[in-house]
Amino acid sequence: MTRVAVKVILVVLTCAAADCKKPPQPGDPLGGLSAAERARFDSGRVVFESTFTAEVGLGPLFNGSGCAECHEDPVVGAVGDEVERHASIFHPEQPGFSCDLLAPQGGPVFQDSVTPALRAALGIEREALPPGVSTAAARTTPDVFGFGLLDAVSDSTILSYADPDDRNGDGISGRPNRFFDGRIGRFGRKALVPALREFNDGAFQIEIGITNPAVLDEGTVTGRPFPAGTDPAPEPELNERGLVLTDAFVRLLAPPAPLKQSREAKQGREVFNRAGCAACHVPVLRTGDNPIAALSHKDVAAYTDLLLHDMGDGLADICFGLATPNEFRTEPLMGLHLGTQFLHDGRAKTPEEAIDFHGGEATRSRDLFRSLPAADQAALIAFLKTL
Amino acid sequence: MRTIASPVVTLLIATLLAGVAAQQPTAPPPPAPQATPAPAVSHDTVRGAIRAIDVNARTVDITSGVGFAIHVVQLRLPTSLPITDRESGQAESIRLGELRLGDVIRASFGGQAAPFVAYTFERVGRMVTGVDTLP
């Protein structure tokens, strides 16, 4: 046997012993799916990638003509450069229900595109903000990788990290947001939405103007009904199977595999913990029972607690459910290496800038980072760029 | 953004939108042998948070929705309708004036236009504290 052949055999045996698997690439499905789950994932990708036209229901108001128009870079399901407008009115004097999410005006998302029919009827290029609302918050497009795992984390796990009154005195006081029916929220930059399926179903109508069995109402133009003839497609414009498949694609997308860590990055992980970042950016969440085996009782390196935290006046914009203008959900850091802009509105162009914008409960960690030796700062950034 | 155009993909999309096409009749449907009149009142349920209360008009506005697709349902509560408080795990009757903004309610209702008429109305929790049980 030649020396080369021996080496090949050794590599193969070593790999087999270590259960070598190619890490998932962005856009890949979770490992361990059944054939049926994989088939639904593949079919769902087709819906996710499809482009809707006005003839099949696009609009009349919309932000994109399909899911992948925004979630596209570098692959379908990833980030995009689109920035949306969200708005609400905060009534701090009204305890219990202090945030008006403008439901009579069609909700907090204001669309930036119109179909030719609506443009012809109203002469508008986008949906106007309601009277009394002068500014809108900017929201960038996040990737949706690993969202099925976040959905599978139990409410009790999320609540186990909550400390609304900061009883442990660490300066961190996370609390859950809640949807209007009282359920704990977790999706969206302010964690309003409790379930991935609902987020997806609602997004078809809000983002693309595609009605479906979950949202049969086309909505309004800042509270006014759409003019006759501007929405020719009958409702629902997408059927239940379309919703189910799209949900399967998003739900079964694998979280981005972390990049291989250099020695500097490994040191950075220690700095991350020392600086207190992990108090909110909890490195690993454990999923609960789930009918999909690939989502059941799995660790997900999400680097979030899915709770709201006061991020200070500098980042404050709008209220959202129970979230005050200052409060944001801890942004998951998984997939950070794929990002091209950071924070909810994309104001930070680098992870260093994002850290610098932290305030509120994160002030102490931010200041600790600023006071670190340059080598430690570099190590922390190197670590973040592997996530 | 990529646009998929293979025959398989086209077939799948057509299937998903087929529900739409199927709802567009190409010819008038034949009359039913024993046609029953369409119900005058549609029925629905809502679970959401109170955003406004008008005690004099006996109307309550409920915020609900699916994801970010949020809407308001306005209900009129007949004077004869009991309002049940299940927030504490018990089932007690309360007055309309005892409801508060942010109360999480569950209701069934009917009617053709807002305000819809409530058939049942229960307070099940508070938005700030959550609910004891889920449907």
Image (cartoon, coloured by chain):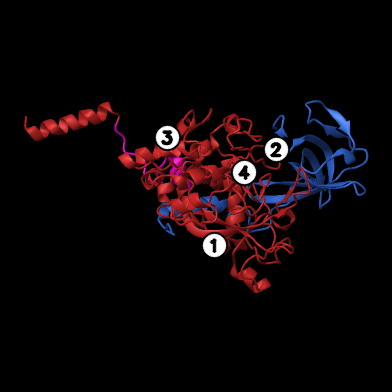
Chain colours: A red, B blue
Marks 3 and 1 on same chain: yes
Q: Is mark 4 on a helix, strand or loop?
A: loop
Q: What residue type is labelled 2?
A: Gly
Q: What residue type is labelled 3?
A: Leu
Q: Closer to the N terminus: mark 3 or mark 1?
A: 3
Query: Mark 3, chain letter?
Result: A
The quarter in which the N terminus of chain B is drawn is: bottom left
Query: Mark 4, chain letter?
Result: A
Q: Closer to the N terminus: mark 3 or mark 2?
A: 3
Q: Do the residues labelled 3 and 1 touch (CB within 8 Å)?
A: no
- The residue at which mark 2 appears reads as A182
Instruction: Count the labels in the image.
Output: 4
Percent coordinates x, y for residue A123 in the rendering: 65, 74
Q: What residue type is labelled 4?
A: Val
Q: What element carries label 3?
A: loop
Q: Do the residues labelled 2 and 1 touch (CB within 8 Å)?
A: no
Q: Residue at x 46, y 46 (%)?
A: A371
Magenta extent: A20-44
- The residue at which mark 3 appears reads as A33
- The residue at which mark 1 appears reads as A53
Q: Nearer the viewer, residue A44 or A179?
A: A179
Looking at the image, is mark 1 or mark 4 nearer the viewer?
4
- The residue at which mark 4 appears reads as A193
Alpha carbon distance from label 1 to label 4: 28 Å
Marks 4 and 3 on same chain: yes
Alpha carbon distance from label 4 to label 3: 26 Å
Is residue A64 shown to the viewer in this render?
no
How many other residues sit within 10 Å of disc 1, few (<14), some (14-19) or many (≥20)? some
Q: What element carries label 1?
A: loop
Horizontally, residue A82 falls left or right of residue B107, namely left
